[in-house]
Image (spheres, rainbow, N blue to C red):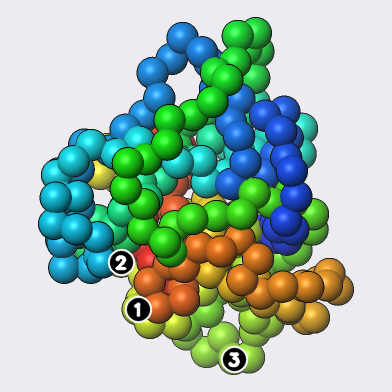
Amino acid sequence: MGEWARPAVRLHPVPGSPGVTDSHIGGPLLWPADEPWPWCDGSKHDEGLTILPADSFGVPVALVSAVQLYRRDFPELPFPDGTDLLQVLLCPLEHSDEESDHFGPCVQLFWRSSAITDVLSGAPEPAVFEPQYRTRPCVLHPCRIVEYPMGDEQPVGAGDWPPVANGSKLGGWAFWWQTSPFGLECPSCGADRRLLLALYTHEEPEKELCSCEVAERAVVGWEFGREGALNVFACTQDVQHPIKLHID
C-alpha cells in the first residue's frame, strides 16, 4: 500500500470572520489594488442548468472568492518559486463545457506573493448569482491525513483499503462515486494531473482518518452537482499549466 499513499489536508471549515491575511473559505482576498478583478466572460454559461433569467447568459460576471491559502499554513501545496499565496475564485453561475466534460462553475487559480502593500478595499459584487454558490465565510481548522485510492484508481487486487475523505481538502485522492477518472493528462506537457483541491458540499466525519469533530455538514453553504465535490486537478510538473475541473 505504501507506494499508493498520498498526504492530504482536511480543511475543516467553520463559520467565522476571516480577514485578508488569513487562510479561509469564502472570505476577503489579499488582492492588489492595481490589479483588475477577474471576470467570467459569460461565453459558457449554461441556460439549461440554471434558474436565472435568460438575459443572464453571455453577460460578464465578476468572479467570487472561494478559497485563500497561505504557504505558512499549508506548506504542502506546490507553490511556484516566488509565491506564498494561492487564491481560488469561481464564477457564481453554472457553466457547460462539453469539450472538458465540466458542468458547474468555472474556476481560476492565482499563485502570488503576499508582499502586497496596497490592498483592494472591496471586490465587485456579481450582477447575478446562483443560490448554490453563495458561501458563508469560514476559518479553517486543518488536520493532516494519509489517503489511498478508491475504485478504478486502485491497483488490481487491492482489497479493502481505508476510505477517501468526504470533506474539503488539499491533495490526497479524489472520491469517485458517480464517475471514473478521465482526462487527467496535462494538455501542455503530457504529465499527470493530480488532485490539488477538493471543495465539498458536505463535510463528513471520518473517524477512520481523523478524530476531528464535524459540527455542521453543510457548513459553507455551496452545493456542487448532486451534493458532490468540485475537484481541481493540477499538473504535477507545473501547477500553472491548465487545470482540470470535475464534479463528482
Percent position (x, y) of residue 212? 84, 69
Q: Do the residues under discs 1 and 2 have CB atoms within 8 angstroms?
A: yes
In this rendering, the count of numbered labels is 3
Residue 193 visible: no
Q: Quick check: 4 left or right of 237?
A: right
What kind of element bears circle 3?
A: loop
Disc with the residue nearer the chain's start (1 vs 3): 3
Residue 233 visible: yes
**Mark 1: few, some, or many residues within 10 Å (few <14, many ≥20)?**
few
Q: Which residue is mark 2?
A: 182
In this rendered view, identify the residue nearer to me: 35 or 56. 56
- Which of label 3 and label 2 is nearer to you? 2
Q: Which residue is mark 3?
A: 159
- Which of label 1 and label 3 is nearer to you? 1
How many angstroms separate mark 1 from mark 2 (CA)?
9 Å
Q: Residue at x 64, y 81 (%)?
A: 163
Percent position (x, y) of residue 239? 45, 37
